[in-house]
Image (cartoon, rainbow, N blue to C red):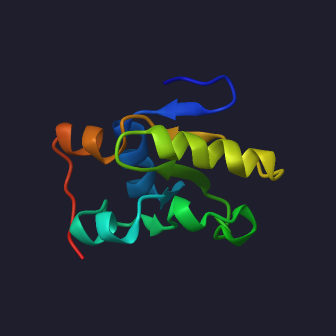
Amino acid sequence: MSDPAVEDLTVEQVKAGLEDGSILLVDVREPNELAAERIPGAIDFPLSTFDPAALPDPEGKRLVFTCRSGRRSLTASKAAQAAGLQYDAHMAGGILAWKAAGFDTETG
């Protein structure tokens, strides 16, 4: 699922970045998916209503997209870049890989 314009970050890299405050994780799954399960600290920004101009200011952090498996996050990163933003990373494998690594999720 690699793409030359989008860097695949591992779940371990993203977890470390969330813990040290260097990553802003943006989850592009839909509201029903987010209500069922989410990565703690991720920002909700559904792909169905995706507007690159409305993305939150990462305030010096690296903005990284995530989704269920990595496909929609790749799409979001490409859309942001097409809009002139330098958001070139996504979490490879999405929340499925996050859970497979044994990392915590939350509901609601």
Examine the image and state in which quarter residue 38 appears: bottom left
Could you tell whether 1 is left or right of 97 in the image?
right
Q: Point out residue 33 in the picture as x, y percentages from the top left corner.
A: 30, 63
Q: Does the rendering let one see residue 89?
A: yes
Q: Is residue 102 above or below residue 19?
A: above
Q: Point out residue 45 in the picture as x, y percentages from the top left corner.
A: 52, 67
Q: Is residue 24 above or below residue 3?
A: below
- Which of 66/10 is in front? 66
Q: Which quadrant is the C terminus positioned in?
A: bottom left
Instruction: State the residue lying farthest toward the bottom.
Output: 108
- Residue occupying the point 50% across, 65% down: 46
Q: Does the rendering let one see residue 87?
A: no
Q: Point out residue 75 in the picture as x, y percentages from the top left corner.
A: 59, 43
Could you tell whether 30 is left or right of 87 in the image?
left
- Which of 94/49 is in front? 49
- Which of 11/22 is in front? 11
